[in-house]
């Protein structure tokens, strides 16, 4: 007998939503495990107490599970448990491979209610798509997204405003030592603060990008930022993106990815992004050179250079859509659970 687990969250407590999501979960479990109704003997469902409008077992019956024994039960109302969640335990026979458990929607946060905190580390060069991917992953798992590059950008802004060059390491380190760099979250989105001021938009300017790369070379700056990043990741599950997450910030992170793409592809992405923001003066060749220079600086610095952690999975997004990259990473995470 094989026992397979699964869970999915619903958006609303309505019979249509429960039927739709129960069907989606059961179909995904059938595909992942090569099940058919002959080897699928029984399914036990449990639902959180905020699900009241329909039994998932009824939904399963209506989805065409005619021979399988079905049973639904309500879970205790545990404070802090993932809301609006349907869980299943499937009893099957004759599986030729190891069971593949399936967690969808916010339940993909690895059974957050009973599992420990976890971190997903995404490192890679600028323009590889890692921040878009990281945001999508964090949303899928219902966990925090920490953009660590934004913190180095805020440090760069501090120097920019004070007119200090990062080449003057002593003055730069002193100026950043007294800077208060922090993040807060508004409707799930990170806002980056410099001395209490929201600088989230200002730090995206092109002149700050190269400066941030130079600032990130400074040992004491890295030490201060890494400490803050560990503090944030220590409190909750999160997806972090940066250059050194898997190698230096969280070397024990259970899920590590190195997201990369061809330099020209990355420059084209940035070029499109800037044009969409109304910036038409940007030359693509210039941008490619700038990206290559920043890669070189990030990869060749003495402290925590950009490099792939030995246990990170490489994701080359040159020919991938964001959705494909996210699906690939989720698959890899699922395989490791
Ligand atoms: O990802 P980004 O472009 O916003 O990062 C800005 C700069 O900060 C980048 O050139 C490298 C540096 N950085 C870093 O050194 N370590 C990190 N964890 C994140 C960013």
Image (cartoon, rainbow, N blue to C red):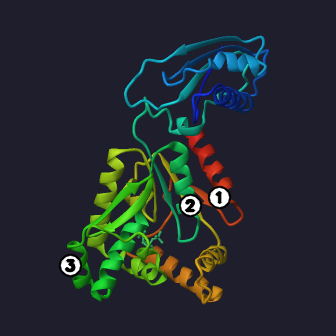
Query: Which mark lies nearer to you, 1 or 3?
Result: 1
CB at disc 3 and ligand 1 closer than 8 Å: no
Q: Earlier in the sequence, mark 2 or mark 1?
A: 2
State whether residue 146 appears in this view.
Answer: no
The quadrant the N terminus occupies is top right
Pick the residue in front: 74 or 27. Answer: 74
Distance from disc 3 to disc 2, alpha carbons, whole Å, reads: 33 Å
Please identify the quarter of the rendering in which residue 304 is found: bottom left
Q: Are marks 2 and 1 in contact (CB under 8 Å)?
A: yes
Give the labeled residue for mark 3.
Answer: 174
Residue 247 pos. (x, y %)? 42, 59
State whether residue 180 appears in this view.
Answer: yes
Residue 311 pos. (x, y %)? 51, 52
Residue 318 pos. (x, y %)? 68, 66
In the rendered image of this protein, does residue 246 appear above or below residue 110? below
Pick the residue in front: 122 or 68. Answer: 68
Q: Are marks 3 and 2 in contact (CB under 8 Å)?
A: no
Give the labeled residue for mark 1.
Answer: 322
Distance from disc 1 to disc 3, alpha carbons, whole Å, reads: 40 Å
**Residue at x 28%, y 59% (from the top left corner):** 227
Please identify the quarter of the rendering in which residue 73 is found: top right
Pick the residue in front: 13 or 21. Answer: 13
Q: How many marks?
A: 3
Answer few, some or many: residues within 10 Å of disc 3's Cα (few below 14, many 20 plus, some between 14 and 19).
few
**Residue at x 62%, y 86% (from the top left corner):** 280
Query: Which mark lies nearer to you, 3 or 2?
Result: 2
Does dot 2 land on a helix, a strand or a loop? helix
Residue 90 pos. (x, y %)? 64, 19
Q: Viewed as shown, does residue 224 lie left or right of 94?
A: left
Give the labeled residue for mark 2.
Answer: 132
Does dot 3 land on a helix, a strand or a loop? helix
């Amino acid at each position: 007998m094989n026992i397979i687990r699964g869970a999915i969250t619903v958006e609303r407590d309505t019979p249509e939503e429960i039927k739709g999501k129960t069907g989606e979960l059961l179909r995904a479990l059938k595909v992942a495990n090569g099940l058919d109704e002959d080897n699928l003997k029984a399914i036990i469902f449990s639902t959180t107490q905020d699900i009241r409008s329909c039994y998932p077992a009824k939904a399963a019956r209506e989805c065409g599970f005619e021979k399988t024994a079905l049973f639904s039960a309500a879970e205790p109302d545990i404070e802090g448990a993932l809301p609006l969640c349907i869980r299943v335990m499937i009893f099957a026979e004759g599986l030729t491979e190891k069971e593949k458990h399936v967690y969808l929607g916010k339940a993909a946060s690895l059974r957050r209610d009973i599992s420990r905190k976890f971190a997903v580390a995404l490192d890679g060069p600028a323009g590889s798509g890692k921040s878009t991917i990281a945001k999508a992953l964090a949303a899928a798992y219902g966990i925090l997204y920490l953009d660590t590059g934004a913190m180095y950008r805020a440090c760069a802004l501090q120097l920019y405003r004070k007119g200090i060059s990062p080449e003057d390491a002593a003055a730069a380190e002193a100026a950043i030592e007294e800077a208060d760099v922090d993040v807060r979250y508004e409707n799930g989105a990170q806002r980056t603060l410099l001395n209490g001021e929201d600088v989230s938009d200002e730090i995206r300017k092109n002149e700050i990008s190269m400066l941030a790369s130079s600032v990130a070379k400074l040992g004491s700056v890295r030490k201060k930022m890494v400490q803050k990043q560990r503090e944030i990741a220590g409190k909750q599950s999160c997806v972090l993106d940066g250059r050194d997450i898997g190698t230096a910030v969280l070397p024990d992170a259970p899920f590590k990815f190195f997201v990369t793409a061809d330099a020209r592809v990355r420059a084209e992405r940035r070029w499109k992004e800037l044009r969409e923001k109304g910036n038409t003066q940007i030359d693509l060749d210039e941008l490619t050179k700038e990206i290559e220079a920043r890669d070189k600086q990030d990869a060749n610095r003495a402290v925590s250079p950009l490099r792939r952690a030995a246990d990170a999975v490489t994701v080359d997004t040159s020919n991938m859509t964001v959705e494909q990259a996210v699906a690939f990473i989720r698959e890899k995470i699922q395989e490791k659970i």
